Amino acid sequence: MNISYTSREQVEVYKFPWPVAIGVPLLALFVQFFLPVHAPFLLAFDLPLLVTIFFAVSRRNPVSGLALGAVMGLLQDSMAHHPIGMYGIAKTFIGYLASSLGVKIDVENPGTRFLMTYTFYVIHQMIYFAIARGMAGEDLAWHWGHEAASALANSLMAIVLFAALDRFKERT
Amino acid sequence: MDFIRRHLNISILAAVLFAQVLGLAVQVKAPGETGSTTLIRRWAVLLITPFEEAFVHTQNWTGTRWREYFYLRDVRRENERLKSELEQLRLEQVRLREDANQARRIQALLAFKEQFISKTLAAQVIGTSGSDQSRILYIDRGANDGVQANMAVITPEGIVGKVLKPFPSSSQVLVINDQTSGVGAILTRTRLQGILKGTPVGEIRLDYVMADEKVEIGEDIVTSGGDRIFPKGLPVGKVAAVSPGRDMFLNIQVKPAANVNGVEEVLVITEVTEKEPDTKDLGPVRASDILAERLPSVPPKPEAPAPAGNPSGAAPAATVNKPAVRATTPAPAANRTDPASGTPATTPKPANASGAAATTPSGTNKPGSAAATNTPKPAVAAETR
């Protein structure tokens, strides 16, 4: 039995109708690839990461969390020009962490969601940079200001997005 | 086995991570794209780009119908403004044509070879990589349209990037503000060369310009042609900021001429030809003429009565005016000097014979040029074609 710091209500495991479970991640990818053509500032958002976090903490199943993270990350990698697996590894890890965290603490209120997303975004970027520099040999520069601002933007977006996606939740 | 069953989740995580790390290691070790990664990318692109393409084309169709049939406000006023702008540009064109002709003559003297963009392909931007770590655009033209890797992608304003991977009906374009991009560039005023690179936040900087050089804000930057991808002389942007950088180089920030972040239509340069400048229509010219036009002019001498036996008024050979010499050589164009009469075919003959060649190849007088001020030139140099 999992040790929980929350009430039974808060560790409720949710499921989603299959059109939502498949459609929302695909839509997130599509929006991520397409919208920056018209609004370049949207590149600062990582919608696939936010969707991975949301489904992982809602389902509270580490295997489905890491699987979704891996698929989203690998699809993102395949549209970029770096070696395939850089986003894959980072998002696999975040999917696993988010679902494990979802079992332990309350992730339903906006404050927690903000902090959780902020932390996960920074960890995600750190993993990505570590792989890029350590394994792929890419000469990427880490800018704390840029990463902190992006983490903030993604955390604010997460509050709105998660509230919208909450409507599709179904209790098991 | 029992350990794995007890720690199933973490075991699966380890297995998935291990598989990806292994795949990554194989890609890093193998130079270029391996077969499997090409296949994964191809599938992903084939899966996603048709939707993007359909979306963009629907959007364009709707936008065009709206603009062309419904939203016609201010069209008349805009038409008038464009007409007046066109007249201004025509005047400027006359001046630029003259400069271009002169530049071609000089290039011919130096046996320069120019690169001409002979074929371009218009393309629509249909998507991005979706990541600010990878500044990639997807365009709706691919290998089926003749697009190949390393072709330059531009807009009329300036360069955008190069084709990284062509797929059958779409292509991946590496934008110049990507961190892995590199473009040979040259500062137009100081002629200093550097390499254009992207930064992690999507800005562009010009690297490898020595710290003791003087670079001014606002100076234009064009392609140097040294990368063998972008033809020489395409606009890149302007210097936005200059500061001392690390090591011995300047830190030059560049404002791109093209809107590389929000570009929606581009041109792919599919063919570049290299040839010597065509000067046969410009007429023969002497090296001294070209130099003389650049020299400060001397005020014209007062008119002297023509000596007997020289009714045309032309100067004797030893002090012959530059234009008079030019008048003795045949010129093919209609507004060149008429070989028979020694006067321009399309302009009335001025009182002084030297005035004949004050007419430029475009048929206009170039203000301020040596010829226009009727300055005698030494007839010492041999003709050069």
Image (spheres, rainbow, N blue to C red):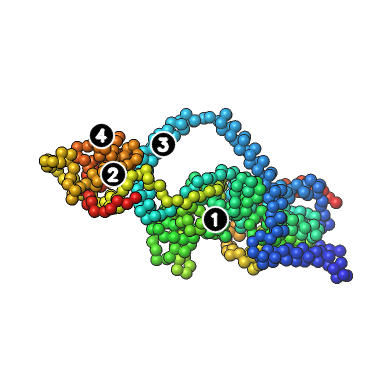
Q: Looking at the picture, do discs 1 and 4 lie on one chain? A: yes
Neighbourhood count class around disc 1 (C-alpha, 10 Å): few under 14, some 14–19, many 20 upward: many
- Which residue is labeled 1 in the image? B177
| Amino acid type of the residue tagged 4 in the rendering | Pro
Q: Position of residue B262 (x, y in %)?
A: 56, 47
Q: Looking at the picture, do discs 2 and 4 lie on one chain? A: yes
Residue A163 vs residue B300, the one in the foreground: B300
Neighbourhood count class around disc 3 (C-alpha, 10 Å): few under 14, some 14–19, many 20 upward: few
The residue tagged with tag 4: helix, strand or loop? loop
Residue A64: image tag: none
The chain that hosts pointer 2 is: B
The chain that hosts pointer 1 is: B
| Amino acid type of the residue tagged 2 in the rendering | Thr
| Amino acid type of the residue tagged 3 in the rendering | Glu
Sequence order check, earlier mark of 2 and 3: 3
Q: Nearer the viewer, mark 1 or mark 4?
A: 4
